[in-house]
Image (cartoon, rainbow, N blue to C red):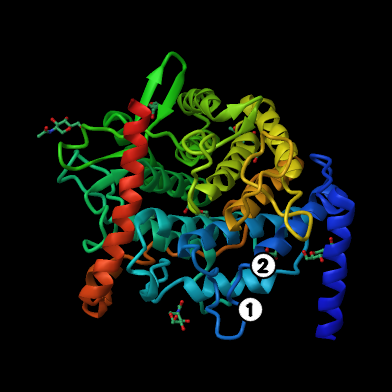
Amino acid sequence: MVKIKNFANAIGTLLCLLIGKASALTLTVGDKDSVCDAATLIINGIMDYYEGIRYGGTVGIFQAPYYWWEAGEIWAGMIDTWYFCQNDTYEDIIFDALQAQKGSGNSFMPQNQTLTEGNDDQSFWGFAALSAAERNFTNPSSDEPGWLALAQGVYNTMWSRWDTSYCEGGLRWQIFTWNSGYDYKNTISNACLFAIAARLARYTKNDTYAETATTVYDWLKDVGYFKLDGDSYSVYDGASITGNCSSVNTAQWTYNQAIVLGGAAYMANYTGNNTWVTEVGRHISGMSVFLNNNILYERQCASSNTCNNDQRSFKSITSQYLGATARLVPDYSDQVMEIIDASAKGAAESCSGGSDGHTCGTSWTSGSYDGNYGLGEQICALEVIQNTLVMQYDGPFDNSTGSSEGNSAEGLGYESSTNPHEITVTTRDKAAAGIITTIVLAIVVALGIWMII
Ligand SMILES: *[C@@H]1O[C@H](CO)[C@@H](O)[C@H](O)[C@H]1NC(C)=O
Ligand SMILES: *[C@@H]1O[C@H](CO)[C@@H](O)[C@H](O)[C@H]1NC(C)=O
Ligand SMILES: *[C@@H]1O[C@H](CO)[C@@H](O)[C@H](O)[C@H]1NC(C)=O
Ligand SMILES: *[C@@H]1O[C@H](CO)[C@@H](O)[C@H](O)[C@H]1NC(C)=O
Ligand SMILES: *[C@@H]1O[C@H](CO)[C@@H](O)[C@H](O)[C@H]1NC(C)=O
Ligand SMILES: *[C@@H]1O[C@H](CO)[C@@H](O)[C@H](O)[C@H]1NC(C)=O
Ligand SMILES: *[C@@H]1O[C@H](CO)[C@@H](O)[C@H](O)[C@H]1NC(C)=O
Ligand SMILES: *[C@@H]1O[C@H](CO)[C@@H](O)[C@H](O)[C@H]1NC(C)=O
């Protein structure tokens, strides 16, 4: 059987090469059958990178060089596919992945990841747990923590790290002191905490989360990570605690702005307060720096074709939060859907490469495949394409419509009392983690300087 299948694949590949774009994605945006057919092809490409169903592979994670955090982004995207396409083919795989990586503290801090896990990394798995709750994804058995509880575990561990000793607040990038970047307070970690708190507020109707969301949002503004210019916010990358967060790195990434936008959309929907609707509008205006003919692009690195593996996935979470914004804030639905639809068309055109004929590229603005490929390209295309359906479905479930079990005390005290990681980290591991993070930091800083010049 295997041999026959391989042979069939080989013939298929040959045919694709001979007849060119025959198997490229064809997409009618907003058409469920068309979107779900495209999703099937794109997810086939995603699963090529998945370790968890291979002999000796670890459940929940993707092969190197993709970091642990990116898996959280993938599972959140595939939960949306499960929901939009009502297709349970990958239900068990998604379920097992989240269970395998939730960690002994039920807050997505597995022991294996202490050399790479920062607040932002943890958040992306928190987002996956929130998506599971908000999509009414199949629940764990009643003796296990529910998806909501796991998201609360992420929230509680993150909020306990809120640090007023520098810059009058904010989360540091890193959780663990031995990872470089510990002295950097970045927008992404804080934007993620803001969005998690806002989503928990809306789901649980517990105002404590809304208060936290407001605190984090106000801090981001006060410290100068957002700059209001007319009716539009620019969102910057972050700053070092050395200098009290005063030297802001002004690099602009799609996901920083989109996650803040999405969090504000959840707050607007939850509170019904027009102040939040105004903030939503200012962040939508700010997104214009990432649009070319209304199509998303990663301005910081795309034109020079220097986006790294992480950066090549950012348009994915960006698309997901744009979809949430369209669904949650009626005043802006049409404007945001135009961005999603234009970007989805561009993404589908980019998905015409590789031996299968539908491998997705990085650029959505070129009208064709640009030669790049990877897990990031696949998940970005999946998210933007499936979000063309978002207005046809109800908004996210909450605790009056959904079924996820919560526990507002999940994860509390976990780090201080039961963090077992420090003792097991050897000096050599620390050095390796330091080098990787230093390289990443150097690139971030270099890009920042380049932008200023
Ligand atoms: C469900 O998804 C699987 C895998 O992506 C695909 O093969 C199948 O055709 C889908 N089913 C339907 C009804 O679309
Ligand atoms: C931790 O890493 C080991 C070795 O790679 C692997 O076998 C194990 O499954 C991992 N555990 C988790 C929870 O990822
Ligand atoms: C949500 O999930 C619960 C538990 O699986 C189920 O009983 C309920 O019907 C689901 N709600 C909807 C609207 O699908
Ligand atoms: C640190 O920055 C905050 C604004 O974020 C400012 O209010 C405070 O005075 C600064 N502290 C020092 C010691 O510079
Ligand atoms: C709306 O939100 C703003 C900012 O958080 C707050 O100052 C104001 O009191 C709120 N208005 C209402 C009616 O809750
Ligand atoms: C909140 O979102 C729902 C859709 O999920 C929408 O129907 C409703 O109008 C929104 N409410 C507010 C206050 O924006
Ligand atoms: C939803 O959360 C509120 C506030 O925590 C609580 O009072 C209510 O009982 C919850 N509803 C359901 C259906 O769980
Ligand atoms: C609301 O959330 C806070 C923060 O996690 C928690 O301390 C409190 O018990 C929650 N309240 C309810 C009614 O669940």
Using the rendered view, name the quadrant where residue 425 is placed. Answer: bottom left
Where in the figure is residue 432, as x and y percent of width and height? 29, 67
Residue 434 marker:
none
Using the rendered view, name the quadrant where residue 435 is placed. Answer: bottom left
Q: Is residue 374 left or right of residue 245?
A: right
- The mark nearer the N terminus, 2 or 1, is 2
Q: Is residue 139 left or right of residue 150?
A: right
Instruction: Provide the residue designation for mark 2.
Output: 47
Amino acid tagged 2: Met
In the displayed structure, would residue 389 be above or below residue 341? below
Residue toward you, 377 or 412: 377
Q: Residues within 10 Å of mark 2 (few under 14, many from 20)?
A: some
In the displayed structure, would residue 4 be above or below residue 172? below
Amino acid tagged 1: Ile
State the quadrant of the C terminus.
top left
Where in the figure is residue 315, as x and y percent of width and height? 57, 43
Q: Are marks 2 and 1 in contact (CB under 8 Å)?
A: yes
Residue 330 visible? The answer is no
Most distant residue in the top direction: 230
Give me the residue at 25% from left, 80% from top: 424
Circle 2 SS class: helix
Give me the residue at 31% from left, 33% from top: 449
Circle 1 SS class: loop
Q: CA distance from mark 2 to mark 1?
A: 9 Å
In the displayed structure, would residue 164 be above or below residue 343? below
Instruction: Provide the residue designation for mark 1.
Output: 53
Residue toward you, 178 or 365: 365
